Amino acid sequence: MSPLERFSAAWREDYVSAVSAKDHESEDTECVFCALANEPANESTGVLFRSDTSFITLNAFPYGSGHLLVLPRRHVATLQELREDEYTEFFWTMRKAVVALEATYQPDGMNVGFNLGHAAGAGIPKHLHGHVLPRWTGDTNFMTTIAETRVLSESLVATWQKVHAHL
Ligand SMILES: [Zn+2]
């Protein structure tokens, strides 16, 4: 199984078990984002870009084509736990993801944001991650989108190849 497939499986598992989130969170399970943080950027891992303290990856469980995640490489759950240098690089990387998606898809708009905590809809709340998602006029709204599992029009590998060309 490739790292991307492991990530995808773990992500789904986390969604399924979100109902019993309290028990789940207290377990000392391996963090799928930490495992991904040191993977090389390639089609197999789904990682698109890595800096010293942050990285961009495909969302293995996307709400639509071109759905990226931007993460600190260090395991922190909140924005306030980031050091100043990590914070700066994290948002620099968020902007880099926005620029790459703009160049790749020329969308009508973009959702950029965070779900902090299970109650806010975070699938994996223990490791901070920002969502960057291209949107088109006529899409369902973001809250509807994230409440559903959507069928993709584009494979993850195809997304990786297209976006990576613009990073
Ligand atoms: Zn982690």
Image (spheres, rainbow, N blue to C red):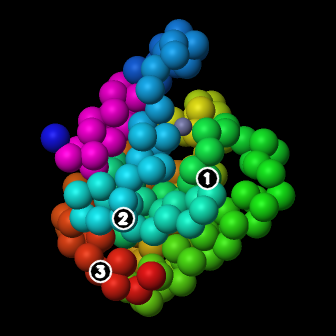
138 is higher (above) or lower (below) than 102: above
Image position, residue 6 (x, y; %): 27, 39
* Amino acid type at image mark 1: Pro
CB of mark 1 within 8 Å of CB of mark 2?
no
Image position, residue 37 (x, y; %): 47, 49
User: Which residue corresponds to mark 2?
Assistant: 41
Name the element at disc 1.
Answer: strand
Q: Which residues are magenta?
A: 2-16
CB of mark 1 within 8 Å of CB of mark 3?
no
123 is higher (above) or lower (below) than 161: above
* Amino acid type at image mark 3: Lys
Is residue 69 visible in this depiction of the protein? Answer: yes
CB of mark 2 within 8 Å of CB of mark 3?
no
Is residue 108 visible in this depiction of the protein? Answer: no
Quadrant placement of the N terminus: top left
Magenta-colored stretch includes residue 134: no
Mark 1 vs 2, N-terminal side: 2
Q: Which mark is residue 162?
A: 3
Q: Residues within 10 Å of mark 3 (few under 14, many from 20)?
A: some
**Magenta residues, dominant SS class:** helix
Mark 1 and mark 3: span between their CA atoms? Answer: 23 Å
- The residue positioned 40% from the left and 21% from the top of the image is 17
Image position, residue 141 (x, y; %): 49, 61
User: Which residue corresponds to mark 1?
Assistant: 72
